[in-house]
Image: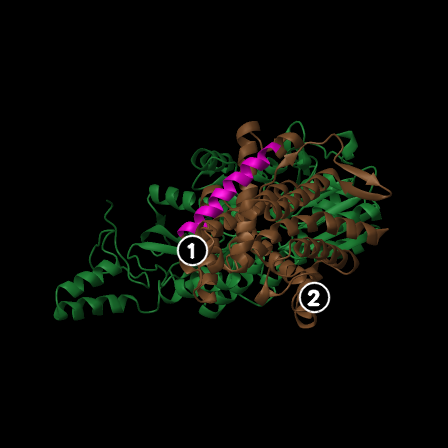
Amino acid sequence: MAIAQFVVNGLLVGALFAAVAVGFALIWGVVDIINLAHGEMVMLGGYTAYWLLSIVTGTAEGSVLLFLATIPVVVGVLFVVGYALQRTLVSRVIGTDIFLTLLVTFGISIAIQQLAIQVWTANPRSIQVAFADPSMNLAGLVVPKMKLVAFAGAIVLTAILYLFLQRTRTGRAIRAVSQNPEAAALVGIDVEHTRAVTFGISSAVAGGAGAFIATILNIQPQMGLIYTLKSFVIVVFGGVGSIPGALTGGLLLGAVEELTAGLVSSQWTLAVSFTLLIVLLVVKPKGLFGTGADNEH
Amino acid sequence: MTLIYGVGRNNTPMAEPMTDNHNRRTFLKLAGGTGALGLTGLAGCAGNSSNGGGGSGEGGDTITLGGSMSLTGDNADLGRLYKDAYQETIDRINENGGVEAGDGNTYELEMELRDDGTDASTSRSIYQELIDREGIDYLLGPYSSSVTLPASAVAAENEKPMVEGGGASPEIFSQGNEWIFGLLPTANKYAKSYLDMALAQSSTPESIAILAEDGTFSQSTAEGARNKIEETDLELVVDQTFPSGTSDLSTNLGRVRDQGADMLLLCAHQKHNIILANQMESQGVNVDAAMGTVGSLNDSFKGEVGGNGDYIYGPTSWDINANFEDPVYGGTQDFVAAIENNYDYTPDYHSAAGEAVIMTFVNAFESVDELTPTTVRNTIRDSDPFSTVYGDVSFDDSGVIAKNMLIRQWQPDPGLQTVYPSSVAQSDPIYPMPDWSER
């Protein structure tokens, strides 16, 4: 029973990791950069929801419906942030040396962190969502209701992104740019705009996940790095360019971390996760579902 | 501007009176501007005065206290408490005419506090730079044990006294370092009063769970708790260490719930206290008592967790309701009012310890015949107890203040109350704390 509880805990947070990672994978695949500022989008999403609720309720506390009402606003705000970042900064280094792109996105992450500290202080914050009974018991397993809501929210965000890419004209344009930017340009696709939209969508999904994270964990200006690292691991697990792969990778990472914490110790979670990463890179370098970083999409 | 006698870097009064602006840096600039001959003569004067590397930093009539602090990073919220207390106290001392030192001179105090980002190696570099480049002889300690331990080694290597109010690991004081003085009871004592309080209740607990962050301070706190538990009939049913970076305690709290622990001790800082309070509710963890060792008594903690923070305990080395005499503020309540009025928050023991850090130096400066790092260090070590807003201050042979922790609890109606020991308690503890379903 204890193991089942650990797995449930892991799957619940793993879906959030996955929602963050799909955006990371999308930018990697379409814009061809490793966005080290991706974790900061999670942070900004969390703070946007926090302040929206604070403005409405005065205390960053509210009902689950009120909290869910903030998600579209968070997604919209983070889309604009991501789009603007791509247009003003990231676009200048696309196609250059990979170290330059890493440096620029790393610089963006540090700048956002420091700005956040100046504006919001380093105090950790959290959103309080009111439930009459905060947890439920399913066949002996304790499932916090807000974690279940966050799990569902993360799955919905991931699914919407997947359907958007598969079913919409813009989604097809994004996939076209990721496969061959030159050919996409030849058929009339505005490549720069499409890349910026991709950056915006990825940031929006990460921000939405950040809002849920603010309700079940906490948020602070320097939280981004760990989510960027987790995204990296998940993308390698699942394979670059595969949304189902990222979802599976996220759930797998969550389960592995919680099983490690439960059966061994929390101190070993990162060590085990990154050992798995190394093993996967050696044994299955293209990930569980993907086609590899060299041949994505 | 007050005309006071300038001193060289060994604090020996110079032959001519000098205004505040004529510090050593401008002195050298003037010398450069007036030509080589003047430079030689004047620099010679400055050179003589710096013989022995005295204690006033760059300033001729000032004593500079230098240090690093967590002004950004995980502990920035607590670092700010020290910075504000330092600054407020120094400003007041200067407004009152400065420090009348035992060497017959009056000095203004100056502070050079740099941000270490809550990073030990950054802090260590800052101290080395303050000593080497700024010539600072008197060091204000940083925040947190993990940062203080390496910083205190820099103080010892350079033979500069460091007084700190933010590091409580016994490791800091077990290195044979004679240059470090700590104003917090060491971490191994943090849980002692909490356990004593619970064991003094009519319905005594039978089991306890410890969740500890993997930092130096928190591990020392946990070790002290384990030692204390061995002396009691309490059964230690969960003993888990988690990494500082973790933001999810649900699996560990699940252990606490499944093992049916009566007491919970979280050895960690504020971030994890917030997670603890929220996840105890969401995971349905019901214990008779829960305490976080650092940050659980701050207004910002309660502000973030709201009702989930009710009934949680925390240790403090200082009671805000006390009224100790203090030569700068008058008394503890005047200090509380000053911080509330000027910084818009209620001070806690970190703030009071910060004030006592400054007052420890001031007391030593006033007592020494000659102002040097060694004489100041010796005076701090041998000083009789002196009163500050933090209470009486004196140090044992290892450099630690002799003080026991008090226990405070967030209670729903009156708010934060001192509940143990009974001699200073404002209220009885609400023990056991009600189950989540009854709140």
Q: Are marks 2 and 1 on the same chain?
A: yes
Q: Which residues are magenta?
A: A69-88
- The circle drawn on residue A276 is 2
Q: Earlier in the sequence, mark 2 or mark 1?
A: 1
On the image, which quarter does residue B288 sit in? top right
**What is the three-letter code of the residue carrying label 1?**
Ser
- The circle drawn on residue B246 is none
Percent across and percent down for residue A144 are 75, 40
Chain A on-screen colour: brown
Please tell me which residue lies in front, A111 or B264: A111
Percent across and percent down for residue A96 are 43, 65
Q: Residues within 10 Å of mark 1 (few under 14, many from 20)?
A: some
Q: How is the image coloured?
A: by chain
Is residue A117 among what the camera can see? no
| Residue B128 against residue B206 in the figure, above or below | below
Q: Viewed as shown, does residue A195 lie left or right of B247?
A: left
Please tell me which residue lies in front, A268 or B408: A268
Chain B on-screen colour: green
